[in-house]
Image: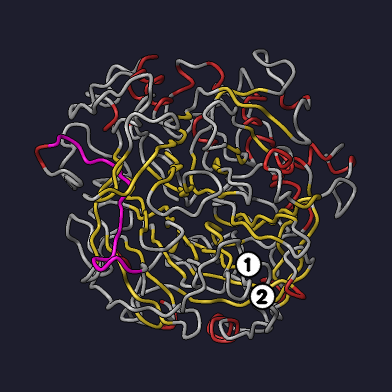
Amino acid sequence: MSSSFSDPSRIDNQSVAGSFSDVFSARLSRRQLLKGVATLPLLGLPAGCATPGMRMDAGAIGFAPISLSTEDRVRVPAGYTATPLYRWGDSIGSLQGMPEFRGDAGNTADEQLLQAGMHHDGMQFFPLPHGSADSTRGLLAINHEYSDDGLLHTDGMNAWSAAKVRKAQAAHGMSVIEIELRSGGWTVVRPSVYARRVSAMTPMRIAGPAAGHAAMRTAADPAGIEVLGTINNCANGYTPWDTYLTCEENWNGYFANDGKIPAEQSRYGVNAKGAGYRWHEFDARFDAAAHPNETNRFGWIVEIDPYDPAYKPVKRTALGRIKHEGAALAVTKDDRVVFYMGDDQQFEYIYKWVSRDAWNRNDRAANRDLLDHGTLYVAKFNADGTGQWLELTHGKNGLTAGNGFASQADVLIKTRQAADIAGATKMDRPEWTAVNPIDSSVYCTLTNSSARGGKDQPGVDAANPRVNNTFGHIIRWKEDGGDFSAGAFRWDIFVMAGDPLLPDAGKHGNIKGDVFGSPDGLWFDPAGRLWIQTDVSTSALYRGEYAGIGNNQMLCADIASGRITRFLTGPKGCEITGITETPDGTTMFINIQHPGETASERSDPVQPLAVSSWPEGPSAGRPRSATVVIRKDDGGVIGT
């Protein structure tokens, strides 16, 4: 996912391992790679465990495609209605207070802690009461990825201060809100005992193998078991016992190190100035020179119980420390939980984690520490369509003391370095992962990689077959034996995104159906329809190869035919992200992030409506990220 000040073109991975292009590209040209790899057959493996309560209606697409758009609104097919529900600055409905949003961004940090944070991202619907399949009342857990200080403060970043840093930190993290379907549509229930904001200042427990490790200790936390806050919360996941997983992505940009940067920080992108948030100027823990271990306390997956506002969030170190994009759930035949995860940066890797123990279906509390014990793997994609999961366990695959890993805690704190040594395949920005509930295949969006094949950069390989891959692609695989815990898999490329109307159409994609680029958000509904959300950076949107594609969009893929149909287009300058549904499939929730963002990937504090005035129009003062409710006018299942 893009975020203000993030640099998706940056390359932190300078390792020489992980690409077989030197061997493979010598045998095949780029065109042969594109043609051959895209048609590698997937093995016809049996389906794995279905999600409890799965809705198994036909997965056909029953709506007419909509056109591309540059309009400043959300568009959906005829017969559907899209309505904003929860916007940045809206009250969460806390019992502690319900401050209203000020159009001039004049809310204080304390007020922001009781309001929706900025830049909504991944989210999940949890029915109420717990254990039910109610589709008219529930909780929404929603990530707030980052802050755009040009919009967050009345005068933007002028007269930068500790108060502005505190408000920015309050705008990060995630929300839990209660929502209900009433006669007038969906509404946020206010007040609600469930309403909660988690921010960059919320105390969190550190658990798992890295808890208490010397590299996790700081002056403020000499035991290395508690950290303040979570930041850059991008995509998400959830557990079978109904807890929420929020994922820390571009956390490195909040730190600055103006001294000699150690290799451990450099491998994760920490630099001298940070990414422009300037927190280190008024919050010393983000000074990575003065407090080097604080960087090790971010880059994790955080578990939150949406049903229990008193539950202290937990950073689960067993799942590794990367720039987590999300965590797609699967369940093995013996009830162990599996998560598929992308590390969102050019030439980073795809990971899998398998729990040691089965989850307890009858005792929710018994699963409290299940995510602290398991095995982390990283993917190697072979040229012949096979692949292996390389185990990232101390003592295996070169992860020894001699190579800098004295314990499993070292492996997890330095997950990227461990994957380098193990020999994983460098991918084109692995983002969201999704598991097909019908045939158990797993999909991953590879958003783009303009550096692929460039000078001194990795060349093409079978899994990443396009030089200067500005449009991205979607890869998929099936585990051997239909077992999510298997050590090997077979893979192919589902689609190469792009615009076939451009010169050299083969270079620009092989889409059946509607054109798109930079696939990002990815989600299967229970019927097996694949929903694809795009995140063309505003630095590329409307120009160059993206000149004819318009605003970012959401599409739906029929897996059987490969046909992809456009369902939604967003307002100007936005990203489409986050997706979840009610159990009956009649309500879908998606997020519109950073409407009005300019080509600089910033919003203008002087003219905040220069690009977009969504969702409220010019009189509202500022564009606002928001959760959108989508309903079929006849009350039917979305997508049919």
Dot 1 and dot 2 residues touching (CB under 8 Å): yes
Kindly identify which numbered label has been placed on residue 47.
2
Quadrant position of residue 222: top right
Crowding around mark 2 (Cα neighbors within 10 Å: few <14, some 14 to 19, many 20+) is some
Percent from the top left, x then y, of residue 173?
A: 47, 34
| Cα distance in 3D space between marks 1 and 2 | 8 Å
Give the labeled residue for mark 1.
50
Does dot 1 land on a helix, a strand or a loop?
Answer: loop
The reply, left or right, for residue 508 in relation to residue 631 is right
Q: Which residues are magenta?
A: 620-636
Q: Amino acid at mark 1?
A: Ala
Residue 548 image offset from top left, x and y in percent: 25, 70
Nearest the eye: 184 or 199: 184
- Way the structure is coloured: secondary structure
From this view, report whether residue 9 is shown above or below residue 47: above
Residue 478 rendering spot, x and y as whole percentages: 67, 73
The residue positioned 36% from the left and 81% from the top of the image is 513
Locate the C terminus and report the quarter of the image it occupies. bottom left
State yes or no: residue 635 in magenta. yes
Drawn side of residue 362 relative to residue 609, left or right: right
Taking the spot 15% from the left edge, 36% from the top edge, the residue there is 607
For the point 43% across and 29% down, the residue is: 193
Residue 238: x %, y % from top left: 57, 49
Q: Nearer the viewer, residue 136 or 85?
A: 136
Tell which of 545 and 196 is nearer to you: 196
343 in the magenta segment: no
Question: At label 2, which amino acid type do we have?
Answer: Ala
